[in-house]
Amino acid sequence: MRALDSKDIAAYKLTHMVYALQAISFFFGVSLVVAVIINYVKRNDVKGSWLESHFKWQIRTFWYVLILAVLGGLTIGIGLGLFILSFATIWLIYRIIKGWLYLYEKRELYLKQQYNSAH
């Protein structure tokens, strides 16, 4: 498991807090907005570290869920919206669980894939 230096400890705790805020958003929707604001405000603090991938994951989660929620809301009248909103909910749960597990294991998200020139 990855060791945390003194600089990473605060950012590591903050990243846990952002995942918690995302999870709480199922009860208090505004916490998802608070979480992404924290991501943007503190993004420079994690630049270049393995935690940067978690911030990227959390920010993308917010924007994709927002887009899906808007699409779902706009199409609720034709029956498609309920499917889209259900998908957005399941997808948000998946993103929170995967991201939080990777963080707990001190693993980076979006690992760069090595490609062999022969492929």
Image (cartoon, helix red, strand yellow):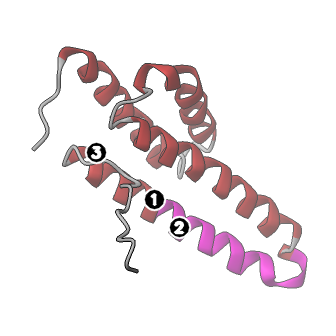
- Residue under label 1, please give it: 95
Q: Which mark is residue 103?
A: 3
Q: Quadrant of residue 87?
A: bottom right
> Where is residue 1 shown, x and y percent of the image?
9, 44
Determine whether the residue tagged by mark 2 lies in a helix, strand or loop.
helix
What residue is at 57 percent from the left and 43 percent from the top?
59
Element marked by disc 3: helix
Image: 33 above or below 80: above
Rendered location of residue 112, percent (x, y): 38, 55
- Distance CA(mark 2)–CA(mark 3): 18 Å
The reply to whether discs 1 and 2 touch (Cβ–Cβ < 8 Å) is yes
Q: Is residue 52 left or right of residue 106?
A: right
Q: Label 3 neighbourhood size at 10 Å, few (<14), some (14-19), many (20+)? A: many
Q: Which residue is mark 2?
A: 91
Outermost residue, bottom direction? 79
Residue 89, compared with residue 23, is above or below; it is below
Is 18 above or below relative to 114? above
